[in-house]
Amino acid sequence: MKIKRFLALLLSAAMLLALLAGVSSCGVPKVMANELTAGLGSQYVNGKEPDEAFGKAALDFSLSLFKKNAEKSGENMLISPLSVMIALSLAANGAAGETLAEIESVLGLTKEELNAYLYTYASSFPNKEECKLQTANSVWLRKDAIEVNKPFLQNAADYYSAEVYSVAFDSATLDDINAWVNLKTEGLIKKALNKIEPGTLFYLINTVLFDAEWASAYTKNSVRSGSFVNIHGEEKNVKFMKDYDKCFFGEEEKTLVKFYSGGDYAFIGVLPESGDVYGYIETLTAEKFESFFDFGEVSYAEVYLPKFEYEYSTEMKDILASMGIEKAFEANADFSAMSGDYPGELFIQGVKHNTFISVDELGTKAGAVTVISGGCGGMPPTEEIYFDRPFVYFIVDTETKMPVFAGVAADIGK
């Protein structure tokens, strides 16, 4: 199984936790904070090449997370399983006992395996002008409130390239965090937090940026106006992009596979025959998802894909708890591996997830941020396909089949 590329995607999301430490060319303010990992230096760590076990664990977690989010959504939806997985992996390095065991169970791998896999994955992460996936990682600690353990700092720096900062958690810190997220997502997500809650003692932040051109871009003449019937049955005006593309024709869905430049990533558009996108998601399995890559079954069709753009935001605390991570959100959680000052008292207060996507003639831009907050206590067209009603879509690593982004276009257009 081609896992190496998948590993790169996953660690990219983990690197999202890196902190803004200087002034950007766009005028992003410098973070005035005490960087705790600066004097640690890098230690040699052992990575691990992605294998089938890693790929299975990552895909199972991704689809489970996608399904759980779909249960509470009735509109547009978009998550980055990669971002959430890396943020949770970083959190696992601060957890112990039953708290750690639950995180490892939901992610399907041990903390040591996650660190090694994601570290290796980062080394093969693609970063070309025509197709790039970037991540950053940072840890923010309330100054004079937490004495963080050195092993946690070392793992965060060595495996996740994370910078750890001790700050006052005041209005300046709020501005710094949002400026960092804005910088790391190149302006796709301008704000991750609206305020800092009084009881919050730490933030683990992960961002993902995907920016890629189509392998075969749409021409100006291929764009035409049309109607999109949203999930409420209302007609909206959209711009359709027409091309001859690879497709699968199954009993339950019609599927578009459109590659980005280089072929390492692809846009997967799924049009359920029933018209019920959320009902279709409930039936989606890893085997079904992997069948989208069975290119021996591919046909060609004249496909009309709408241009679209939207933002999405959700709180994942209850979702992750329903998946099996419960102890981490309780007052008696065990994050003693992060800080010995609060043994058995630090816990995760929330897991906020914001995303953005834009799909047009040239390609796709997508961004994600995961904020974990913690406190104390070749054939001619056979038919025409119009994505003119709600559809499911993914941005995937074509080698590992890892969904970097997974979404539903339920209400687009004007």
Image (tube, rainbow, N blue to C red):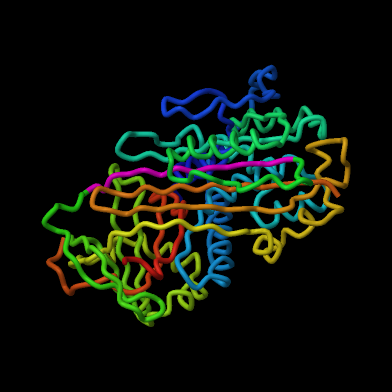
Q: Is residue 164 above or below residue 221?
A: above
Look at 54% across and 57% down and name the residue there: 313
Q: How far across and down, in percent of the image, does residue 312 sit?
A: 49, 58
Look at 34% across and 56% down and name the residue there: 267
Q: Is residue 208 magenta?
A: yes
Badge count: 0
Q: Nearer the viewer, residue 200 or 206?
A: 200
Look at 53% across and 36% down and name the residue there: 179
> Most prominent secondary structure in the magenta stretch?
strand
Q: How far across and down, in percent of the image, does residue 394 sit?
A: 41, 59
Q: Nearer the viewer, residue 203 or 303?
A: 203
Q: Is residue 248 left or right of residue 407?
A: left
Q: How far across and down, in percent of the image, does residue 220 sit?
A: 14, 53
Which quadrant of the figure has residue 212? top left
The part of the chain drawn in magenta is 202-215
Q: Is residue 4 left or right of residue 146?
A: left
Look at 54% across and 40% down and name the residue there: 11
Which quadrant of the figure has residue 108? bottom right
Q: How far across and down, in percent of the image, does residue 95 sit?
A: 77, 44
Q: Is residue 386 left or right of residue 161?
A: left
Q: Nearer the viewer, residue 288 or 253?
A: 253
Q: Is residue 236 above or below residue 30?
A: below
Which part of the image, by quadrant, shows the C terminus? bottom left
Q: Of all residues shown, which one is farthest toward the front?
A: 171
Which quadrant of the figure has residue 321? bottom right
Q: Is residue 401 above or below residue 142?
A: below
Q: Is residue 322 left or right of residue 366?
A: right
